[in-house]
Amino acid sequence: MSQRVLVVDDEAAIRDSFERQLALLGYEPATADGAERAMAMLHDFDPAIVITDVRMPDVNGLELLSWIRERASEIDVIVITAHQDMQTALAAMKAGAYDFLTKPLDLDQIELVLARCVRDRALRRKVKLLAGDSNEPRNRLDLVGRDPAMIEVSKMIASVAATRTSVLVRGETGTGKEVVARAIHSNSPNADEPFVAVNCTAVPEPLLESELFGHLRGAFTGATNDRKGRFELAGTGTIFLDEIGDVSPAFQAKLLRVLQDGEFYPVGAERPRRTAARVIAATHRPLEQLVREGRFREDLYFRLRVVEIRVPALRERAGDIRPLAEALAGRAARDLHKPAPALPAETIRKLESYDWPGNVRELENTLTRALVLARTPVLSPDTILVDASARFASADDAIAPDQSLGAAVRAHVERVLAAQGGNKSQAARVLEISRQRLDRILNREDDDGAERNGGRRES
């Protein structure tokens, strides 16, 4: 599909050069000798992308950028700056430019930026459809957001998607780290190859090596046939390793070999196999602290963290709650075979007033529960059932001065459990205690647990 690109520059030689190169690259170009002419052309030509110089005699490029952002925010604007003019480049990015090109112009750079912009536009179109494709995995939440922090995430996705480099996605539980990984994969040149997701905490440690690298027949008791691992199944696609901070040091060494040499050994094999899969890892754990404590290999940390993307918590992007709620409620309604619900202003205000410790996953669960229980297609504030006690407490009010240690521990466990959507196993992992002890605390059978364990944290 041809993409219309409008080039705005007061130098005829630059306009002509752009026009020739864009046509060769398969774009549909048009040119304007200044910002005022570009404003007049915008409606009739209807470009997808505008490339504009900054220094022009009438209206400068940054003013044109602001004018476009106010009237046609769907158009991506790429700004041309002088070679050392980084202050202008930063001002352009803050004003909403998609990217900037520096003079003297490099044709390869132009091609790369435009290709990335086209992929990013495709990503945004996919977001607008929001789960309209019934073939998408059920547990996938689409990347939705107008908050500046999420716009930065989208830019990072667009930048890294064209590469094969490793990516580390950081963020709290429920923020959508797998969504980011899928977005990187679906906008990569290998998007038609498999996307293979593995939750490292969901696979017992003795089986993780076989799960990821495969095994040969007879390698261990029960290995009756050869079995391909997830790396081999991923081919030249993407393998997503969730909760990477929880794997053992022994497995970390084997994963490091994959990242360094592109090789792995199936269990029981004497010769390595090759992999060309891109690795995207995710964690909510503080890897830097784990490295200092000797619980996570420093060399593996740097191999994984070639590019880092931090997904903000929902409480940090309150402006996205309305579009997220509308999108998630609409999808939940389709799954429940109900009409799309209305979300009145007072309902949105209630959603925006909550801290969402469980992030987007908790918001989705809350809206789904409201739809299940609602008797009308209007979700009133009364249908939104949230646990106000699950808000993030400050250091001053986390524990009441007259509260016993056992009660304080139990209250914290209940908050973490609520943040994990009631999943006790996940809550136990976050708390770094056993599932049995979590049950004892909830059943009020472990009020003096801290004293009995000598203040030691149970693992």
Image (tube, rainbow, N blue to C red):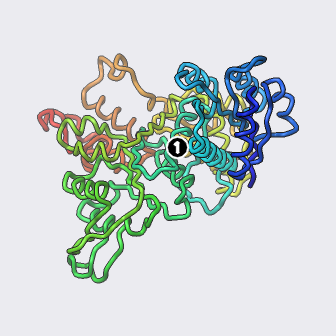
Q: Amino acid at mark 1?
A: Ile
Q: Position of residue 3 (x, y in %)?
A: 74, 48
Position of 292 with respect to 101 (left or right) is: left
What residue lies at 36% left-to-right and 65% top-to-bottom?
Answer: 275
Identify which residue, 85 or 93, lies in the foreground: 85
Toward which corner of the image does residue 114 lie, by quadrant? top right
Position of 78 with respect to 5 (left or right) is: left
Identify which residue, 287 or 398, lies in the foreground: 287
Assign the N terminus to one quadrant of the image.
Answer: bottom right
Q: Position of residue 20 (x, y in %)?
A: 73, 45
Identify which residue, 155 or 439, lies in the foreground: 155
What residue lies at 49% left-to-right and 29% top-to-bottom?
Answer: 388
The residue labelled by disc 1 is: 157
What residue lies at 22% left-to-right and 52% top-to-bottom?
Answer: 248
Assign the C terminus to one quadrant of the image.
Answer: top left
Q: Secondary structure at mark 1?
A: helix
Toward which corner of the image does residue 271 lie, by quadrant? bottom left
Position of 237 with respect to 406 (left or right) is: right
| As drawn, 58 above or below 119 | above
